[in-house]
Amino acid sequence: MAASISVVIPVFNRKEELIRALDSVKKQTLQPSEVIVVDDCSSFLIEDFLRESNYLDQDWVRVVRNEINQGPSGTRNTGVMHAKEEFIAFLDSDDYWDPHKLEKQMALFTKKPELDLVYNGTWVVYENKTVPSHTKLFKDNIWYQLVDNCWTPPNPSTMLMRNASIRKLNAFDLTLKHAEDIDLWMRMTLHDMKIDYCDERLTYFMYNSTGRLSKQYRAKFKKVEPFFAKWEPYFRQQGKESSFHQFKQRSFTKFALETFVDSLRDRSVSIPAQMYFKYLWNRKEFYDLILNKFRRVQPQPS
């Protein structure tokens, strides 16, 4: 018997990746009741493609198409609006799941029925190599981890959430073009939602270097400004302006570090130099990162 789970897959102009994502759902040891593929105005009709690929012969797959392009978060929200089941699992169309993901997450919900969200660790797939993500997982003091430690939660493809809980939050904020997932987690903590995780890597996250080119860093930094503009009044109302400015500074340092590393991976030279002189030269976090990398390559004493 299928579990009361709606899987929401946002997609834009992807074919082979979408098939891989759907196949990973099909292989789940605990099957969902429905899969909602949300076509974000692709240049071709996703519904026709899936019909030709014989995926619409299965009753649990249906396609919804946005009337206008809405981006990943708006497309996820479309899926939430159409989801009928008690739980919602998000799966980006270029990611895929371990066969036991839903089963293990639902087991935790059964054990702890008070939970609103269960998430899990990830594998990162980059240039045909699969490596473990070392992002730490937390279930307590999440506001502190987000604001004081600039923790970035694993991506939405790790999440299994109660339908009622995400609707209570009005899902993802469509006014934001960056950090929408962090915003969602911050709102979850303010609503005192109960969160836990499976301490296993059950999601394969595709690192798309083409979509993350460090030459886009100016646009990325500009896109994150509305996120801080949204949250600044809350911190001010709480009398925590200093905490907000530290949060913003640490966040920009983290974005700069990510851009620095990405651009080196892309064999760029000018962008790391720009990042260093504009954001990193006086930041302790940058030198801590360099020291940690250096320690890892040092020979261990015999």
Image (tube, helix red, strand yellow):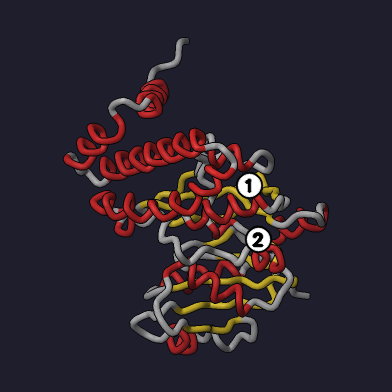
Q: Residue furthest top?
A: 302
Q: Nearer the viewer, residue 23 or 46?
A: 46
Please rate how many residues cluster around mark 2, counting C-alpha atoms within 10 Å: few if below 14, some from 14 to 19, many from 20. many
Question: Which residue is at 77% across, 57% downward?
Answer: 109
Residue annotated with mark 2: 160
Q: Callout 2: helix, strand or loop?
A: strand
Location of residue 107 with respect to 240 vertically, above or below: below
Left or right position of 29 against 90:
right
Please rate how many residues cluster around mark 1, counting C-alpha atoms within 10 Å: few if below 14, some from 14 to 19, many from 20. some
Residue annotated with mark 1: 200
Residue 132 at x, y percent in the picture: 50, 44
Dividing the picture into quadrants, the one containing residue 36 is bottom right
Residue 84 at x, y percent in the picture: 69, 78
Question: Which residue is at 25% across, 33% downward?
Answer: 276
Q: Residue furthest left?
A: 270
Would you say residue 13 is visible in this rendering?
yes
